[in-house]
């Protein structure tokens, strides 16, 4: 009995996917497309807590490396191949010059982990106009508003998206009275601003605000001050804004009232989490661990999304033409499957990738936003972050 056409196709797909790495599945005539990584080493990396391992030196790049591998696994059937070029800049390095070099070499897709101001300046360089930059490292809302660029797409969620996701969960739990404790860094202040906006947006109330004034060196003696700092009336939850990780881990179980802690520590919102396994995410987690020998972080996932967006568009178009791929990625009907039970797409007004956000603590994912009951006339994913009507982005 002759096998059906579908059976033949399925058998070919399975054989190709399980082929050993030493096999050469790409025909010699395959068209190759290079995706570049552009990262910048931090000038003053945060000191890890005593119990933590040092931060990975390949964060983000490891996610893109897996994406390129995935692109090649699917692209082989279309006679497409994908290459990876990586560049790390020193602190204060010239990202605009690096983008000019990549553009001159014919690279048209760059996944970047750069500080917001550096990214904005580099993206505005005339040579970068033909390059699609995937922002996988900067959550700053200003990049999606005043400093937005037509050549920048954002796979990392904005602070507004993270704050909105957390707010939806807290409101759903009827924890609507928040005590906000904010650290001194610019990132802490920006996250606190996003929390204030989310509270007003979803009907929560800040019943108090406190500033954390202790230095990093005094963390080991400051735990006793948490109770005094949180002795401020009644509240349902303490929300901490501590992106630098200076004090947030000291707050749980030491508050004046026995209340949950959320924000940048405690119960957090994130694009990705090591404990997430739904919608076949466990497969992605295992493949990443097998390659990088560590857990996948939110930056790794954002970089993976950028690389996979290029591969997905190329596969659907059956073409590696950069102009066509860039246009397809930005189109209203583009859909990126990304292990979250929803297909993801980029917002036309600010380039942000709309996606579900995980609500989790250190060992478990407790919910996924948008939460049930938070409605939107187009898609509930647009209840997270800056919606079209409030956007201040003018793409240029």
Image (spheres, grey):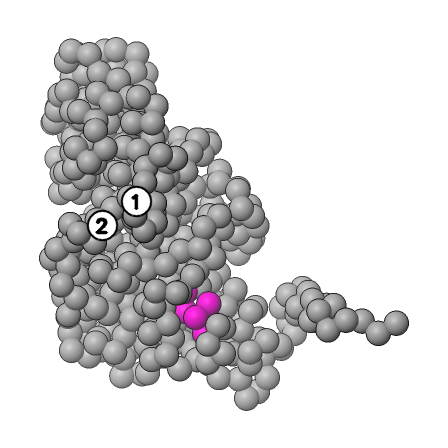
On-image quarter of the N terminus: bottom right
Q: Identify residue for label 1.
A: 376
On-image quarter of the C terminus: bottom left
Residue at image position (24%, 53%) is: 138
Residue 376: which quarter of the image? top left
- Which stretch appears magenta? 309-314
Secondary element under disc 2, as helix, strand or loop, is: loop
In the rendered image, residue 214 lying in the magenta stretch gets the answer no
Expressed as whole percent of the image width and height from the top left, the position of residue 212 reads: 14, 27
Pointer 2: residues within 10 angstroms few (<14), some, or many (20+)? some
Q: Identify residue for label 2.
A: 387
In the rendered image, the residue lying farthest to the front is: 377
Cα distance between the residues tagged 1 and 2: 10 Å
Q: Nearer the viewer, residue 387 or 207?
A: 387
Q: Nearer the viewer, residue 389 or 38?
A: 389
Q: Is residue 87 visible?
A: no
Asked whether the residues under the numbered discs 1 and 2 touch, taking CB atoms below 8 Å apart as contact, a structural biologist would say yes
Residue at image position (49%, 78%) is: 318
């Amino acid at each position: 009995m002759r096998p059906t056409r579908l059976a033949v196709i399925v058998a070919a797909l399975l054989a190709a996917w399980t082929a050993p790495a030493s096999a050469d599945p790409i025909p010699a005539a395959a068209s190759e497309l290079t995706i570049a990584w552009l990262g910048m080493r931090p000038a003053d990396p945060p000191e890890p807590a005593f119990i933590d391992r040092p931060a990975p030196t390949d964060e983000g790049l490891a996610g893109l490396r897996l994406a390129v591998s995935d692109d090649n696994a699917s692209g082989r059937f279309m006679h497409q191949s994908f290459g990876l070029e990586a560049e790390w800049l020193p602190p204060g390095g010239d990202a605009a010059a690096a983008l000019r070099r990549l553009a001159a070499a014919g690279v048209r897709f760059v996944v970047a982990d750069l500080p917001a101001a550096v990214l904005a300046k580099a993206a505005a360089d005339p040579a970068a106009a033909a390059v699609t930059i995937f922002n996988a490292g900067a959550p700053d809302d200003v990049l999606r508003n005043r400093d937005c660029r037509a050549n920048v797409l954002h796979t990392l969620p904005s602070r507004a998206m993270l704050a909105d996701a957390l707010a939806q969960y807290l409101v759903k739990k009827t924890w609507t009275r928040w005590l906000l404790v904010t650290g001194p860094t610019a990132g802490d202040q920006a996250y606190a601003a996003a929390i204030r906006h989310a509270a007003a947006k979803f009907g929560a109330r800040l019943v108090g605000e406190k500033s954390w004034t202790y230095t990093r060196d005094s963390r080991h003696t400051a735990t006793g001050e948490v109770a005094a700092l949180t002795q401020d009336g009644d509240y349902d939850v303490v929300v901490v804004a501590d992106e630098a990780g200076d004090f947030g881990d000291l707050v749980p179980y030491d508050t004046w009232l026995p209340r949950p802690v959320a924000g940048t520590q405690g119960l957090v919102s994130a694009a990705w989490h090591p404990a997430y396994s739904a919608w076949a995410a466990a497969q992605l987690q295992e493949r990443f661990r097998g390659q990088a020998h560590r857990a996948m972080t939110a930056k790794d996932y954002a970089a993976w999304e950028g690389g996979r967006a290029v591969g997905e568009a190329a596969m659907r178009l059956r073409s590696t033409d950069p102009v066509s791929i860039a246009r397809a990625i930005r189109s209203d009907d583009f859909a990126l499957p990304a292990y979250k039970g929803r297909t993801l797409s980029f917002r036309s007004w600010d380039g942000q990738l709309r996606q579900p956000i995980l609500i989790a603590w250190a060992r478990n994912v407790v919910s996924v936003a948008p939460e049930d009951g938070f409605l939107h006339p187009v898609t509930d994913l647009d209840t997270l972050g800056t919606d079209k009507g409030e956007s201040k982005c003018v793409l240029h």
